[in-house]
Image (cartoon, rainbow, N blue to C red):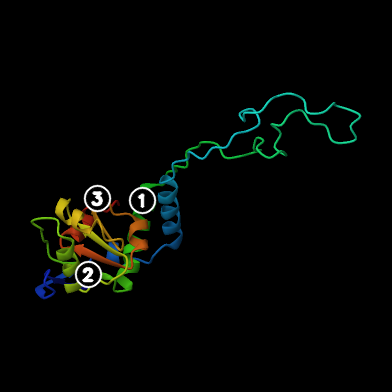
Amino acid sequence: MELSVYKIDGSESGKKVVLNEEIFGIEPNNHAIYLDVKQYLANQRQGTAKTKDRSEVAYSTKKLIRQKGSGGARHGSRKANIYVGGGRVFGPEPRCYRTKLNKKLKQLARFSALSYKAKDNAITMVEPFAMDAPKTKEFIQILKNIKAGDRKILVVLPENSNNVYLSSRNLPEVSVITVDEINTYAIMNANSMVLVDGVQDILASRIKR
């Protein structure tokens, strides 16, 4: 797949980039994408949900009624789960939701997601640029110039640029990451991608055989 590289003013630079077919042209594996996205979301969970069982709630342990002869059910204390404010049965406990995936499976998922974006013509190439200071208005204008779209834009940089990141921080529909941070969830969650020229070469150099 061949793409034109745009300047930040929206004009074509005259350079053409051929995307690696092993990255942007494979047959997408939906199950690999599912597993990788599932792992990513699970790893974001803190796992701190906790409820109190009957041994932890603050109530008296005094027996409410006598064991026999009342005509009703037996009750030991107000801590029982059938009472309002009593302990919860089988409630959540702190736990770790983190899982592991094979590196080649994660690579397959990432390349499958990129191939989907390439098939949908949702990738825009832009030449490397820098910003002298954080300017959100200037960054918005760059995205408009290159016609990156107006919803869920993922901008991938070859290396960290603090000013570019700060310029996009207040834009809820724009995410800026480096090629080291690129992941299947971020790709699939975006409607369009903006790749700064050079990212494709870094991705190609990291293919695991």
Q: Earlier in the sequence, mark 2 or mark 1?
A: 1
Name the residue beneath numbered marker 2: 124
Question: What's the distance in space between the residues labelled 3 and 2, CA to CA?
Answer: 19 Å
Q: Earlier in the sequence, mark 3 or mark 2?
A: 2
Q: Secondary structure at mark 3?
A: loop
Q: Earlier in the sequence, mark 1 or mark 3?
A: 1
Name the residue beneath numbered marker 3: 180
Determine which quarter of the picture holds residue 74: top right
Q: Amino acid at mark 3?
A: Asp
Any mark on residue 71, and which? none
Seen at 27% across and 65% down, the residue is 193
Percent x, y for residue 71?
A: 90, 35
Percent x, y for residue 78?
A: 71, 31
> Which label sits in the foreground, 1 or 3?
3
Q: How packed is label 3: few (under 14 Cα within 10 Å), some, or many (20 or more)?
A: some
Name the residue beneath numbered marker 1: 104
Q: Nearer the viewer, residue 209 or 88?
A: 88
